[in-house]
Image (cartoon, rainbow, N blue to C red):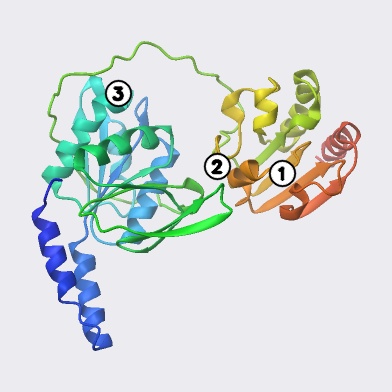
């Protein structure tokens, strides 16, 4: 455990909260809010801030108190740190320039982050529930001897958080008594950050230059001109009902092209080789919340629903009228997807 001076003051302030009057409680709550200090850990790739980081900032804003953004990598002061400084609501941006942190390898990044958390005496550390945040913050929590609260969808107070469990079938409210709260946040639940108009100061962070535990070798990225699945306003998804990769490409791709939508897939479709695993939507895939989620050949298993049920409008096509997907769909069409989807695609093209 790493004791912090601010946390001692925070506990003392809590002890002075007297339930006897509303006025005293309100004053004490305001005092507590002033003692909060949040570090939002930003993920950057090639000098650009990733969308999941904006969710971390949105969550930090709900906590109250000053917000510091943290970013590390090669030449970040002139790129991602400068971009972050324009985000409204940030007090300052702490940047560490070191090639060793460019790819965000958690084994190398965790000691760096712990060093700066201790130096800044932050009460809360927040990152997006992305691959970056999910691999980094558990290591940070272990080094700080505190417990992480993962994938939160709501903030009730500075120590009480809401998160889904059992693939979203139950909602858990968690209260943490740890001196430092380590949080990852669901991107679809925290949005609305203004990315321009801010004027945060950029400061150099502390670099422990700890011995590197891992080395970046290479990566293979699938590039596409389509909208990014995690942030797209329209998503067209296909499931096991498409029967083959050839049919998936023949039926789903033209519809997505017509709508200008990203392509998604159920785990069953990915496991069957119909689509790349980067397109998987669901509990073990990506969480999406587009304006329109149109799916075909997806029955609606709870693991899939966990990743898309926050979509604004859900439209489903399935030949089984009793498929679970129709229980959450706003619009449902019972029929053979091999007939209905091409027909829909043709009508949309004619309208366009």
Residue in the image at 68% along x and 35% along y: 260
Quick check: can you spot residue 253?
A: yes
Residue drawn at (37%, 24%) of the image: 46
**Element at label 3:** loop
Mark carried by residue 181: none
Q: In the structure shown, which secondary structural element does the residue marked by tag 2 occupy?
A: loop
- Helix, strand, or loop for circle 1? loop
In front: mark 1 or mark 2? Answer: 1
Q: In the drawing, what numbered circle is on residue 102?
A: 3
User: x and y percent of residue 55 in the render?
Assistant: 42, 47
Q: Does the residue at mark 1 contact the one at mark 3 (Cβ under 8 Å)? A: no
The residues bearing labels 1 and 3 have C-alpha atoms spaced at a distance of: 39 Å
- Residue, disc 2: 287
Relative to 206, 349 lies left or right: right
Residue under pointer 1: 300
Quadrant (top left/top right/bottom left/bottom right) for the C terminus: top right
Q: Earlier in the sequence, mark 2 or mark 3?
A: 3
Q: Earlier in the sequence, mark 1 or mark 3?
A: 3
Q: CA distance from mark 1 to mark 2?
A: 15 Å
Q: Residues within 10 Å of mark 2 (few under 14, many from 20)?
A: many
Q: Residue at x 60, y 39 (%)?
A: 282
């Amino acid at each position: 455990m790493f004791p912090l001076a601010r946390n001692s003051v925070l506990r003392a302030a809590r002890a002075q909260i007297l339930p006897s009057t509303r006025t005293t409680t309100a004053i004490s709550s305001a005092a507590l809010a002033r003692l909060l200090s949040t570090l939002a850990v930003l993920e950057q790739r090639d000098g650009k801030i990733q969308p999941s980081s904006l969710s971390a900032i949105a969550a930090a804003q709900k906590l109250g108190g000053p917000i510091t953004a943290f970013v590390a990598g090669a030449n970040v002061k002139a790129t991602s740190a400068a971009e972050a400084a324009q985000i409204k609501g940030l007090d300052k941006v702490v940047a560490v320039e070191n090639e060793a942190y460019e790819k965000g390898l958690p084994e190398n990044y965790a000691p760096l982050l712990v060093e700066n958390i201790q130096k800044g005496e932050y009460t809360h550390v927040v990152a997006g529930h992305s691959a970056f945040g999910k691999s980094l913050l558990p290591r940070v929590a272990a080094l700080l001897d505190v417990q992480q609260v993962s994938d939160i969808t709501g903030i009730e107070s500075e120590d009480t958080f809401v998160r889904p469990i059992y693939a979203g079938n139950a909602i858990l409210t968690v209260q943490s008594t740890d001196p430092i709260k380590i949080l990852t946040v669901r991107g679809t639940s925290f949005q609305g950050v203004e990315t321009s108009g801010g004027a945060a100061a950029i400061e150099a962070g502390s670099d422990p230059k700890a011995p590197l535990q891992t080395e970046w070798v290479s990566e293979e990225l699938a590039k596409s001109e389509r909208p990014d699945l995690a942030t797209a306003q329209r998503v067209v998804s296909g499931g096991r009902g498409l029967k083959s990769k050839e049919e998936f490409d023949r039926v789903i791709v033209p519809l997505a092209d017509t709508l200008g939508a990203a392509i998604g897939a159920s785990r069953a479709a990915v496991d069957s080789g119909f689509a790349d695993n980067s397109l998987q939507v669901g509990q073990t895939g990506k969480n999406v919340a587009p304006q329109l989620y149109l799916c075909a050949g997806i029955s609606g298993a709870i693991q899939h629903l966990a990743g898309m049920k926050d979509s604004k409008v859900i439209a489903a096509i399935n030949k089984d009228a009793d498929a679970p997907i129709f229980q959450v769909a706003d619009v449902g069409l019972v029929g053979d997807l091999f007939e209905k989807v091409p027909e829909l695609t043709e009508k949309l093209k004619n309208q366009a």
